[in-house]
Amino acid sequence: MSIVKLVNTFTKAGIRLAVTEDLHLKVSVHNGVMTNELKQLLVENKAQLIEHLRQYSSSSGLELPEITARKRDAMIPLSFSQRRLWFVDQLNQGSVEYNSLNYLVMEGEFSECCFRNALKQLRLY
């Protein structure tokens, strides 16, 4: 399997690969995605993956062009989603309810250490 196909295999599986500045392979993956077969492919091709990603990142010119505002002659119409958000905001001005999926009210003393440990167990921190 070519290195490009191998990278595509990992990408399609939801596995993100990157090379750190000290040339270590960084793998980002959600629980349950990394199968034993994919682990084996990763171990067997680690050196080639590091080299490919190193070359790709250095040759791709990771510096992106600056984003600049365009001059417009007229107002651009809002999308349906933007109009819907505007309408909801007009009903409850300043409300953040539309953006909040859910919330939790906690009472008592707050322990930042315990909170961080809980987030780590949930893999959110």
Image: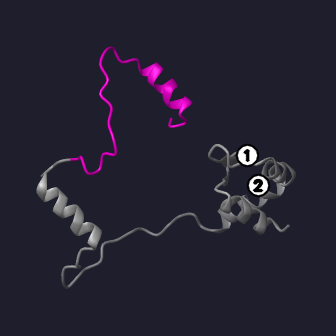
Q: Is 16 in the magenta?
A: no
Pointer 2 residue: 50
Decide if residue 43 is on the left or right side of residue 54. Answer: right
Decide if residue 59 is on the left or right side of residue 43. Answer: left
Camera-side residue: 84 or 19? 84
Please provide percent x and percent y for residue 37.
82, 52
Identify the image quadrant of the N terminus.
bottom right
Camera-side residue: 55 or 115? 115
The amino acid type found where label 1 is placed reads His
Determine whether 3 is above or below 115 in the image: below
The outermost residue toward the bottom is 73
Pointer 1 residue: 24
The amino acid type found where label 2 is placed reads Ile
Please provide percent x and percent y for residue 8.
71, 65
Please provide percent x and percent y for residue 112.
42, 21
Camera-side residue: 66 or 4? 4
Q: Residue at x 20, y 85 (%)?
A: 73
Give the secondary structure at mark 2.
helix
- Whether residue 35 appears in this view of the structure is yes
Pointer 2 with pointer 1, Cβ within 8 A? yes
